[in-house]
Amino acid sequence: MTMRLGALRADYLSGLRTYLEDESEAGLAHAYELGRRAMIDGLGLLDMAALQRAALDTLVLPATSNDRPRFMEASTAFFNEVLAPFELSIEGYRAALSASEERFQLAVSGAMAGLWDWNPQTDEIYFSPHFKRIMGYEDNELPNERHAHFDAIDTRDFERVTALLKSHLEHRQTYDVQYRVRTKSGDLRWVHSRGQAQWNEAGVPYRMVGWILDINDRKFDEEALRTSREEMRRLSAHILRVREEEKARIARELHDDLGQQLTALKMATSMLEHGGRADRPWPPQGALNGMYTMIDDLVESIRHIAADLHPVMLDDLGLIPAIDHLIDEFSGRYRIRVIRHIDPDAIAFNRECRIGMFRMVQEALTNVARHSGATEVVLDIVRADPHCIVRIVDNGRGAPTDKPKGRHSFGLLGMRERAALLGGEIRISTEPGAGFALTAILPLASIEAKDTS
């Protein structure tokens, strides 16, 4: 018997490994043949259970937390197919029923699942110790009563769970559901539950065995990913819209400003084609002065448009002088006082970070002017090893933290993306009547120039 079991073990592991990779019908057919061979060799259900447990320890337990639930489901399907030949015989079928709880326990133990065993006729139920731990209870704290779990199901999911359970018992549809439960501490957690009932010859369910898995972290990650994708989609659409608006703005400035000035210059130049009188100098000094003024205005307009597209001062003088110039223009335009706490020698900013940091400060000040109603802003750029802290605080009206995001939130989203590109993060602190505080925490390793001396 031992030799036959040993020979089967290698084939079992090889077949399950292949099935975990592709979950094909051929893999299940191979599992059935393994079960038939075991039955012919005189092996029993306990021998098969031992093989399954060894396979779980070898193939499923070492898997990552993301792959383990899927591997667990696939290995359970493979194991059930191995047991199918035993269940086709009357004696084997009865043995499989009597061992159903042990079989389920073996199938789920490697996946850290909580087992439940329920009698729909008497309403008696058993919760395994790990089931209770998932719910936040010790083994002696949660009674083995169905309402102990059903009362903990979140009201938003209760009808869906009970409807699926009813469909499984009455119509033998699959019972596989994810829902939220309230734990002993009062927190809501996501669980994944699957179950399988047994029916008598009259079609009446007399037993149902299943498990639950704690998938709260996975649901949190899925929600965070969904939110991130939605924000990226909205940000991409916003960027496209801003790009088109920027093109339209530049076109207007070129047409309305440069176009008009060039037209006026052309008209003034055309006057030189007409000769003057002998008693009057030509060309008139006033006309020349006017043309010089027009040329100066043209140069200033070109510099203004270029500065909006990319502040030349960033490349010529560096980040802090460019921010100082930005603040001076901001204060002069909006009559908002800006108190600066900046040590220009504390950090030697590298060239790669300058435009990102400049745009973050620029966007923060723009939001203050547009939305805050503030009269004063405090700007800090300080070194706090191993970070650089950029903090913009206004004394404006503030905003409720639970307010839905509006169009101006794209500015904040853009700042978050810029900070993330520099390896940092943005933190917001605000409430109605208490102003708005934005803090960028940026690692010095990504923004400080490397010392090459």
Image (cartoon, rainbow, N blue to C red):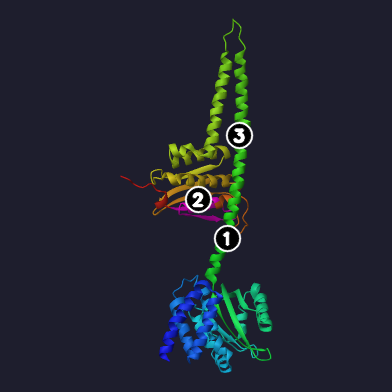
Q: Is residue 330 visible?
A: yes
Crowd tier of the residue under label 2, counting other residues whose Cα lies within 10 Å: few below 14, some 14–19, many 20 or above:
many
Percent position of residue 235, x then y:
58, 52
**From what the image shows, is residue 331 above or below residue 277?**
below
In space, the residues marked 2 and 1 are separated at their CA atoms by 18 Å
Crowd tier of the residue under label 1, counting other residues whose Cα lies within 10 Å: few below 14, some 14–19, many 20 or above:
few
Callout count: 3
Q: Residue at x 45, y 85 (%)?
A: 8
**From what the image shows, is residue 218 above or below residue 293?**
below
Along the line of sight, the residue nearer the viewer: 180 or 250: 250
Q: Which residues are magenta?
A: 414-442
Residue 125 falls inside the magenta stretch = no
Along the line of sight, the residue nearer the viewer: 109 or 433: 109
The quarter of the picture where the C terminus appears is top left
Quick one: label 2 or label 3, which is nearer the N terminus?
A: 3
Q: Amino acid at mark 2?
A: Arg
Q: Amino acid at mark 3?
A: Glu
Give the labeled residue for mark 2.
418
Q: Residue at x 52, y 32 (%)?
A: 303
Give the labeled residue for mark 1.
227
Crowd tier of the residue under label 3, counting other residues whose Cα lies within 10 Å: few below 14, some 14–19, many 20 or above:
some
Residue 440 falls inside the magenta stretch = yes
Element carrying mark 1: helix
Percent position of residue 163, x then y:
68, 78
Q: Is residue 140 visible?
A: no
Element carrying mark 3: helix
Quick one: label 1 or label 3, which is nearer the N terminus?
A: 1
In space, the residues marked 1 and 3 are separated at their CA atoms by 38 Å
Percent position of residue 333, x then y:
57, 38
Give the labeled residue for mark 3.
253
Element carrying mark 2: helix
**From what the image shows, is residue 176 above or below residue 303?**
below
